[in-house]
Image (cartoon, grey):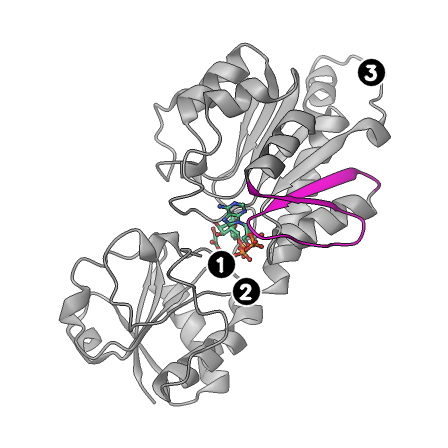
Amino acid sequence: MPIIAFYSKGTSLEVQNIWEKRLKFYLPSINLVPLLSEEAKLAKIALLWKAPLDNLNQLNKIKGLISLGQGVDHILNQNSIPENIPVVRIVDPYMARSMSHWVLLSVLNIIRETYDYFNQENKKIYKPRREKDFLSVKIGVYGIGAIGSVVAKDLSYMGFDVQGWSRTKKNIKTIKCFHGDKGFNELVNNSDIHVCLLPLTSSTINIFNKDTFAKMKKGSCFINAGRGEHVVEDDLLRSCKSRHVSNAVLDVYRIEPLPKNHCFWQQDNIRLWPHVAAETNPETAAKQIANAIKCIDNNIVPPNTVNRAIGY
Ligand code: NAP
Ligand code: GLV
């Protein structure tokens, strides 16, 4: 069984050991070694999260790269990975549900005014606030793929009016589906809560900018768990300061970890999470990664190989 080079930014050796243990259940002879070690030069496959790939050409036996997350921008952005090397991503229903929990939590915190009630509690104020009619809240989900489609369906099941946006035409029961530029404008103009679950590509970078925020209804809410680079951060800040965007909930940033001196920390109507909306779970993801390893080792194109032409 091949040697697997492993790199997961910001984690300890313990995380590598957890993955090795889980993968050994399916591939008993597997051997994970740190990407930046001498042994990694023999690796045929690399398992990566935000790895420094500049010295990928030192790994001259490499046959495939596997993302430790559902997004692959951290691999495709860094380096010109040869076209003949498949880049594979995780597609795990566990992660989609986990994201759905986080988005629902964010939506409910806004609609039920959780933060205002917490403030009242701190001041011992026992006073009902006027409840929003949830039937009148339209939620736009940008990106209705493996994750966004589950989120959109779950929100619809909870009684919200949901519309989704994708690149290609979709037909999902209970969701109004839009696509292309016209569809984007439809969501931007008519949603009360905007949820970004897009992959980061050359077509989606900076998609939420001053023009987009200006077109949103006054008092709109913006939730981002896609990537930080989807948002022009100064434009979001300005829209939040003026209260044109009444609330933002963010899980991802252009620079991660979010620097201590970043202006978002000071802004009362921007809520910040440290990129945890849907974390990869080795328990549920190991089986498909083991399969991808087997496929690459046997020169078979694995499921969930990224389409390099469209970048996701
Ligand atoms: P996916 O299955 O590839 O779905 C992507 C969706 O975005 C699809 O509906 C796709 O349209 C749409 N899309 C892509 N480019 C578009 C464009 N130019 N115009 C309109 N729609 C476009 O991806 P996924 O697995 O759902 O993951 C989405 C992203 O979530 C990841 O790339 C990652 O950035 C982020 N994520 C974040 C976390 C977190 O914890 N914060 C966790 C996991 C993932 P089509 O359906 O037409 O292809
Ligand atoms: C997390 O951000 C992922 O892409 O899985």
Q: Residue 109: x percent and y percent?
A: 70, 31
Q: Nearer the viewer, mark 1 or mark 3?
A: 1
Q: Give residue 140's quadrant in the image.
A: top right
Say whether mark 1 is within 8 Å of ligand 1: yes
Left or right, 150 with respect to 90, comes to right
Would you say the residues marked 1 and 2 are in contact, meaning their CB atoms lie under 8 Å apart?
Answer: yes
**Which residue is labeled 3 in the image?**
129
**Dot 1 surroundings within 10 Å: few (below 14), some, or many (20 or more)?**
many
**Which residue is labeled 2 in the image?**
91
Q: What stretch is highlighted in magenta?
A: 159-180
Q: What residue type is labelled 1?
A: Gln
Q: Which mark is residue 32?
A: none
Image height of 261 relative to 82, above or below: above
Q: Residue 38: x percent and y percent?
A: 15, 73
Q: Give residue 15's quadrant in the image.
A: bottom left
**Which residue is labeled 1 in the image?**
70
Q: How many marks?
A: 3
